[in-house]
Amino acid sequence: MKSILNERNLSDKKILLRLDLNVPIKNGEISDTTRIDKILPTLRFLIQQKTKIIILSHVGRPKGKVVKELSLKPICEDLKKKLNVSAKLITKNIYEIKNKDFFEKFDEEILILENIRFYIEEEKNDYKFAKHLASLGDIYVNDAFSCSHRAHASIYQISQYLPSYSGLQLDLELAALNKITAGITRPITCIIGGSKISSKIDIIKNLIPKFDNIIIVGGMANNFIEYFGNNIGKSIKERNCHEIVNEIVSLSEKNECKITYPDDVLVSKNLNGSPVNKELNQILPDDMILDIGSKTINKIINIIDNSKTILWNGPAGYFENPNFANGSIKIAKKIVENNKSSKIFSVVGGGDTVSLLNRLKIVNNFNFVSTAGGAFLEYLEGKELPGITALN
């Protein structure tokens, strides 16, 4: 895979740049610009190289129809301000743009084609659509790792028709993930949460042979608590997961990877109630487990202190209520503390976890924070990602 960073003959080249600018927009206002901010280095590099930039991206799921609320117009305005360059949103039908000389009609440094998912051909990975897109540029750059698990026209098929490169953000993402799955500095620990253990089973199975510790928190920990003979009251759990937990436990024993689940928990009678710290044998039928307890926090902190590499995906509890955010906050602050003293290399992924770090204003205190979601998880499962395969 070739990085655009290493390509020096770029001056005056027309760059088709695939980005993931799928940010939350309401009433024309962007509420979280994290994904935009992460790709600014790639854009600045291409501007410095005096290239002509044509951005391909999407917002939401319009399913091949033009949806006014899902226009890239607010993103275009945001990029203009942040880069201090001229940029124009091209709303003209892509099929009516016949050749790559359309830059001559505009003075702007950046052209942004309207939401690529307004075209049904995009998600169908249509080769004619991809070929037409390719005809608009000289070079294709994929800097949308978070979309690279999709075999879509502007991610996969387009690379058949142009010299294709990875962008700076995609390079960073792959380097960070490679460091925790291949170039490992041990001991290595994974803290994994979420409500559904079945959605993470392949990740856990793929990581067990490579990791020293897997710490199970969040809703999926309830399945482990119950598996080991404890009552979980009316807590969230995934049904019919006894065999999955058994498989994880057996595999971890075989590979000498220690599985850690909560020793004590914070419970309440409902999501808005007051927290009570309880041992596992004290949980009542009407209790809800909503966070990890103080003993478990100390145990996890001790494991972090004895780790060189950390992967964190999924908060420890129902952090939306501050009463049950303590476990997640203590984990986050401990990783940050060890990061600052260069004791660990830390990678964080998952929407809820990133949201927590943004709320705490510590998102920049980790070695790498991924906004990739599905692509991040599929990479950890060991799957080949179509967008990466195309670049190779």
Image: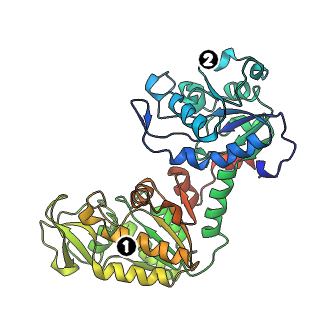
The residue shown at (65%, 33%) is: 55
Q: Is disc 1 placed on a helix, strand or loop?
A: helix
Would residue 96 be visible to someone looking at this image? Answer: yes
Q: x%, y% of residue 325? A: 30, 65
Q: x%, y% of residue 98? A: 74, 17
Q: Relative to 51, is 195 on the left or the right?
A: left
Identify the residue at the far right of this view: 9
Q: Which residue is the site of mark 2?
A: 93
Q: Which mark is residue 118?
A: none
Q: Residues within 10 Å of mark 2 (few under 14, many from 20)?
A: few
- Asked where in the image residue 87 lies, by quadrant, the reply is top right
Camera-side residue: 22 or 258? 22
Camera-side residue: 308 or 73? 73
The residue shown at (59%, 41%) is: 82
In the displayed structure, 174 sits above or below 119; it is below
The residue shown at (37%, 60%) is: 194
Q: Are marks 2 and 1 in contact (CB under 8 Å)?
A: no
Q: x%, y% of residue 283? A: 16, 74
Q: Residues within 10 Å of mark 1 (few under 14, many from 20)?
A: some
Camera-side residue: 309 or 209? 309
Q: Relative to 7, is 350 on the left or the right?
A: left
Q: Amino acid at mark 1?
A: Lys
Q: x%, y% of residue 238? A: 30, 59
If you read the primary sequence from the N terminus, does the residue marked by circle 2 or circle 1 appear first?
Answer: 2
Q: Which residue is the site of mark 1?
A: 330
Would residue 19 be visible to someone looking at this image? Answer: no
Q: Amino acid at mark 2?
A: Asn
- Asked where in the image residue 164 lies, by quadrant, the reply is top right
In the displayed structure, 367 sits above or below 262; it is above
Q: Is disc 2 placed on a helix, strand or loop?
A: loop
- Asked where in the image residue 368 lies, by quadrant, the reply is bottom right
